[in-house]
Amino acid sequence: MKNDDIFEESKKYMPGGVNSPVRAFKDVSLNPPIIKKGQGTYIYDEEGNKYIDFVCSWGPMILGHCDEDVVNAIKHTSENSISFGATTKIEFELAKYICKTVDNVDMIRMVNSGTEATMSAIKLARGYTGKNKIIKFAGGYHGHFDGFLVDAGSGLMTEGIPGSAGVPEDSIKNTLIAEYNNISSVENIFKKYNDIAAVIVEPVAGNMGVIPGDKSFLMGLRELCDKYGTLLIFDEVMSGFRVAYKGAQSIYGIKPDLTTFAKIMGGGLPCGAYGGRREIMEKLSPMGPVYQAGTMSGNPIVMAAGLATLKKLHDNPEYYVHLEKLGSKLQNGIETIAKKKDIPVVFNRCGAMFTLFFNKNKEVKNYEDAKKCDTALFARYFEHMIKSGIYIAPSQFEAVFLNVKQTDEDIDKFIQAFNSFEI
């Protein structure tokens, strides 16, 4: 079947023909290619078209598609188990490995997705502090938990939805909104409310496009949380193991109380986790009063894929040197062309994740800046790039990712494709 035929037929059985909204390519002028195969840095659709993949399954495939060590770990584990819903050695091994190799994680709880990790971390923060309210940031997306769907980023920005139907007002009454990279906005909230359990923030935002946090801003959050007895939660679902093995917190030198993980830590399989200080994590059931459970949490196949991935990343620090080299080359190439051709572009990058904003501003530092982007121009750029064999995210407000299998030649092809784009 052709890509278009499969997509149209899918609409009869899945809302919009997809299981996650951004996959529908709703705000660009194309139907999505139906992906059949991935190998290394390339993906192939049902019609045999080949693309250099800069989406990387929205971040997890940092080792490229079908990495031999990860595939072998999955095969070996699946010969003995698919699922038990019981304690296994492999989940202990991954938990121990993360606690030993990642700063600021004394204990960790495995879950099945980034959304599950963030919503559970918020519950734990409330249980630990005895407080109710949380602070999140406009444009920050922490999954589809009701309490987060206020001024959320990426998919909601792309579709122009201010929130989400089906979310009662009572579900968001304890969610307070501050401005990213503006510490004064956070301080003003703390002065007004005395019932704040947690501040949750992406240290490198990835769902209003990639926007790195200013170090002074993140340090200010740490200081305010210490002052008011509030937990600081770093959402490193996207940045964890990607911008650096130990995440963005290692780049900034800031210690959160809790950290949420997903994406890369599952080796491409559905996975998430949250971890932090022992005294906080011990509030979780069965040790403490905060209840959270999951039948598939710690699934052995997922744990095996995650452990194989993290070991390979940890044991090969040159991977991150390679990714930084590729990212720098790509950024310099795009910025040089944009200046020469007078294309309104702001290129935000942190390590192996970036966003090319079509924005006349000199910088994009927060949600308000991001909303000023020319989404019509982005749609034209997207169509041009995908027809040139460059597979990127179909939204101005999503991150784009690099993987270790990519080469200088792949980056050159991206730059060449951008150079032939006419506005």
Image (cartoon, helix red, strand yellow):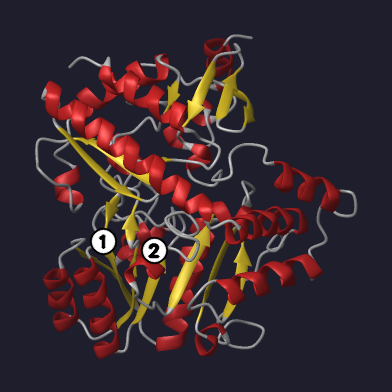
User: Which residue is nearer to you in this view: 103 or 328?
Assistant: 328
Left or right of 37 in this view: 339: left
Comes first in the chain, label 1 or label 2: 1
The structure residue drawn at horizontal position 52% and vertical position 53%, both measured from the top left corner, is 318
Question: Is any atom of residue 15 visible in this view?
Answer: yes
Question: Is any atom of residue 28 visible in this view?
Answer: no
Q: Residues within 10 Å of mark 1 (few under 14, many from 20)?
A: many
Name the residue carrying label 1. Answer: 213
Q: Could you say which quadrant of the image residue 377 lies in?
A: top left
- Labelled disc at residue 248: 2
Q: Is residue 89 above or below residue 353?
A: below
* SS type, badge 1: loop
Residue type marked 2: Ala
Instruction: State the image coordinates of residue 90 (x, y, percent, origin top left).
Output: 77, 65
User: Which residue is nearer to you in this view: 389 or 399?
Assistant: 389
**Which quadrant is home to the C terminus?**
top left
Q: Are marks 1 and 2 in contact (CB under 8 Å)?
A: yes
Left or right of 355 in this view: 35: right
Instruction: State the image coordinates of residue 117 (x, y, percent, origin top left).
Output: 52, 64
The structure residue drawn at horizontal position 51% and vertical position 22%, both measured from the top left corner, is 51
